[in-house]
Amino acid sequence: MSKIFVDACFGKETPYTPVWMMRQAGRYLPEYMEVRKQAGNFLNLCHNPKLAAEVTLQPVDIVGVDAAILFSDILVVPNEMGMKLDFLTGEGPVFEKPIKNQADLDALLGGEEAASKLTYVYDTIKLIKEQLADDKALIGFTGAPWTLATYMIEGEGTKTYNICKKMMYSNPELLHRILAKVTEVVKIYMEKQIEAGIDVVQIFDSWAAAIEPAKYDEFSWKYMVEIADYLKAKYPHIPIIMFPKGIPAFLDKVYGNFDVFGVDWSTPMGYAKEKLGDRYVLQGNMEPCRLYSKESTTECVEALQKIMGGKRHIFNLGHGILPDVPVENAKHFITECHRVSKK
């Protein structure tokens, strides 16, 4: 296990500030696209431990990051709860039958029963750990209950979240029951990832910004904290990263027993440091599009290092890397992060 990366997550002194990049091997690596062709489609790739392990290791071997992030997808959770999932070309993920009422929710598997069906994820983790260098960490992850619920209720990606929000305001009891059921599955899912060998947990709330600040704790954050509390009680040595995207208005209300707060690119790092830097290690927050320019990348990396002063920080993007970023530019980002952190 990467002692440098894990120590950094706990705020301990390290020889340099470690760096990794949001999103898995991804579409920016030609090597990933070759493996994707072998799998036939995205979901097949998630279900194939040998191929999923291969693409997990690609950014480590090719780009030089300090931690690998497990190749999977957040939607394997509702899929194994019993919701039929397809990834349609040009449309993205689609669930055949979204949740509309209590009967739909009751039809889904919960807890241990659902989490036990994700054996291909745990097998992937074991294969990765057999091949991952000792000085690299493996990050496992899950979608936050709110983000998972948006797909489960809407049936697909959405720009308005109107179906979810209609439920939030007109039938909050049902939404809370959905969130509670998903939370129980995620707790055990992450526990099984830890038992399989991951070194760090990250909880993504990709659609956090869809909730107004006054409702965010009730419908998202408290469920994320519940997951963190559950894991910390059993595995205090495993760092937990929280990454809610797009909620700068909520930073002064952040609480919970976790270690790292992921700062998205829309939140000024100085503001995040002011509000959270004394309590949590901060991660992020470079705008991913800066990777199109090596000069802009260097400018941002140096600015982040100046703001953080080399303290309590993990270099990362402020969201996922984009598919047409040149690989050489991604390598430049890693090189620059290591360069400035050793000054």
Image: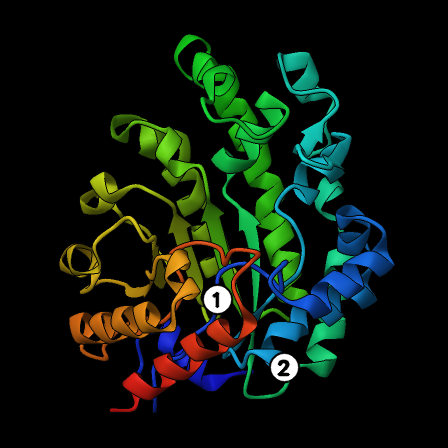
Question: Residue at the location (53% across, 31% down)?
Answer: 180
SS for dot 1: loop
Give the CA distance from mark 2 to mark 1. Answer: 13 Å
Three-letter code for the amino acid on which mark 1 is drawn: Met
Q: x and y percent of residue 175 in the render?
A: 50, 21
Residue 21 image label: 1
Q: Of residues 133 and 332, which is closer to you in this image?
A: 332
**Residue lying farthest left?**
274
Which residue sits at x=27%, y=68%? 300
> Is residue 117 in view from this perspective?
no
Q: In the rendered image, which residue does mark 2 sit on?
A: 61
Q: Residue 341 lies in what quarter of the image?
A: bottom left
Q: Are circles 2 and 1 on residues that touch, CB within 8 Å?
A: no
Horizontal and vertical percent position of residue 127: 76, 73
Residue at 44% across / 61% down in the picture? Answer: 240
Crowding at mark 1 (Cα within 10 Å: few <14, some 14-19, many 20+): many
